[in-house]
Image: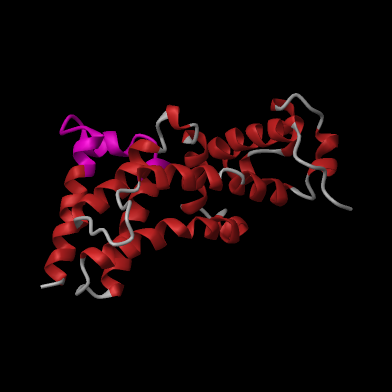
Amino acid sequence: MARPEPTATRDRILDAAEQLFATRGFHGASVRDIFKRAGLGAGLMGYYFASKEDLFRETVERRIPQVRETFEHHFPVTDAQAIVPVRELLEFYLEFFLIDLPDAKSGLHTYWDLLSKCAVSYELQIVSSSLGKLDFIAERMMEALQASLPDTPESQLRDTLAFAEAAVTTLNASAGLFEHRQGKAGSLADYVSSMAGTLATGLQGAST
């Protein structure tokens, strides 16, 4: 049987699912609580989604186009032939995940909490194929980094990008970690700038 077309009710369910999955994780958020938050009875679950896993995957996938649009809007490489300094690229990447997405104005802050929770937990295996649809971010970054540092081994660039990805997801998923580590030493923007500089120095050293 074909799924019902997207409706305001379906969107309400997905909004509720996003909020609860982001705060409680896949196993901590019950279907009953999700539908209750959406103002519906859990008995309607089978009409809209085949399973809880199906609901989770759709919750993860539905904002990917919005993430892509936001990423492309901020991405510093506006011309295929342009070469952007490596530090600027890395600073953009860190800012995008640590400042831009978590900003309430982005409309993606709860969704980013959800993605971070997926990335640092076993829930990743449930949505690994869905998260693969975000690979365009790594691909665009790799293209720009290779243009900026053509003599640096591709493996070195990928390792650095993977480290940056792990850092941003861990910081976002671990509430208060940044504040605990930094104390009054500086702002998040200062941290982003410092980390980008450190990563860029390592890459530039590898290319010489």
Residue 110 on the magenta segment? no
Q: Position of residue 116 (x, y in %)?
A: 46, 46
Q: Position of residue 43 (x, y in %)?
A: 85, 35
Q: How many marks?
A: 0
Above or below 192: residue 131: below
Q: Front-most of 185 and 194? A: 194
Figure check: 151 above or below 65 = below
Question: Residue at horizontal 57%, vertical 38%?
Answer: 24
Q: Position of residue 34 (x, y in %)?
A: 70, 33
* 175 is within the stretch colored magenta: yes
User: Residue visible at 74% across and 35% down?
Assistant: 10
- State whether the magenta stretch is mostly helix, strand or loop: helix
What residue sits 85% from the left and 41% below the top? Answer: 47
The quarter of the rendered structure image containing the C terminus is bottom left
Query: Image point 25% across, 75% down: which residue?
Result: 153
Pick the residue in front: 192 or 6. 6
Image position of 130 (left or right of 155): right
| View extreme (top): residue | 39
Q: Which residues are magenta?
A: 171-192
Viewer-side residue, 179 vs 72: 72
Residue 25: quadrant of the picture: top right
Q: Quadrant of residue 74?
A: top left
Q: Could you tell me residue 62's position as x and y percent?
A: 61, 45
Q: Position of 152 compared to 109: left or right?
A: left
27 or 143, which is in the foreground? Answer: 143
Q: How is the image coloured?
A: secondary structure
